[in-house]
Image (cartoon, rainbow, N blue to C red):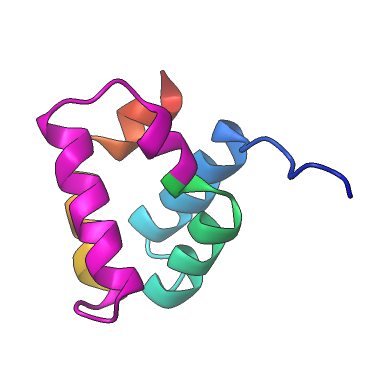
């Protein structure tokens, strides 16, 4: 069986920016970020308070405890755009 493809930070950044600009719905954006393995990137990143906060809210979404828009706002507020661009 083939290994999963590596996450594309460029593609994830484009999809996140589509939500930021209002061109994509929150649920669809979260779907794109999940299938693009954003959670893997965050898990593998050097841990800091912002990364921990993003992962915590991501986990809440995956367990059904919060909505997509709240998670995207947390990702935005904790620097996901800069993380993906860097």
Q: Which residue occupies 34% across, 54% down?
A: 20
Q: Which residue occupies 38% across, 64% down?
A: 22
Between residue 79 and residue 41, name the one nearer to us. 41
Residue 45 colored magenta? yes
Magenta: main secondary structure equals helix
Q: Is residue 69 above or below residue 79?
A: below
Residue 14 colored magenta? no
**Extreme residue in the front direction:** 1
**Extreme residue in the left direction:** 49
Between residue 57 and residue 77, name the one nearer to us. 57
Q: Which residue occupies 19% across, 68% down?
A: 70
Side (left or right) of 74 relative to 85? left
Q: Position of residue 36 (x, y in %)?
A: 59, 50
Quadrant for the C terminus in the image: top left
Side (left or right) of 67 relative to 13? left
Q: Quarter-wise, where is residue 80 in the image?
A: top left
**Magenta stretch, residue numbers:** 40-68
Q: Which residue occupies 34% across, 28% down?
A: 83
Q: Quarter-wise, where is residue 50 in the image?
A: top left
Q: Is residue 6 visible?
A: yes
Q: Position of residue 42 (x, y in %)?
A: 37, 37
């Amino acid at each position: 069986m083939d290994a999963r493809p590596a996450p594309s930070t460029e593609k994830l950044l484009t999809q996140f920016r589509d939500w930021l600009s209002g061109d994509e719905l929150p649920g669809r954006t979260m779907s794109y970020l999940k299938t693009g393995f954003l959670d893997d990137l965050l898990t593998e990143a050097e841990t800091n308070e912002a990364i921990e906060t993003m992962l915590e809210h991501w986990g809440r979404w995956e367990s059904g405890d919060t909505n997509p828009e709240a998670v995207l706002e947390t990702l935005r507020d904790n620097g996901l755009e800069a993380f993906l661009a860097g």
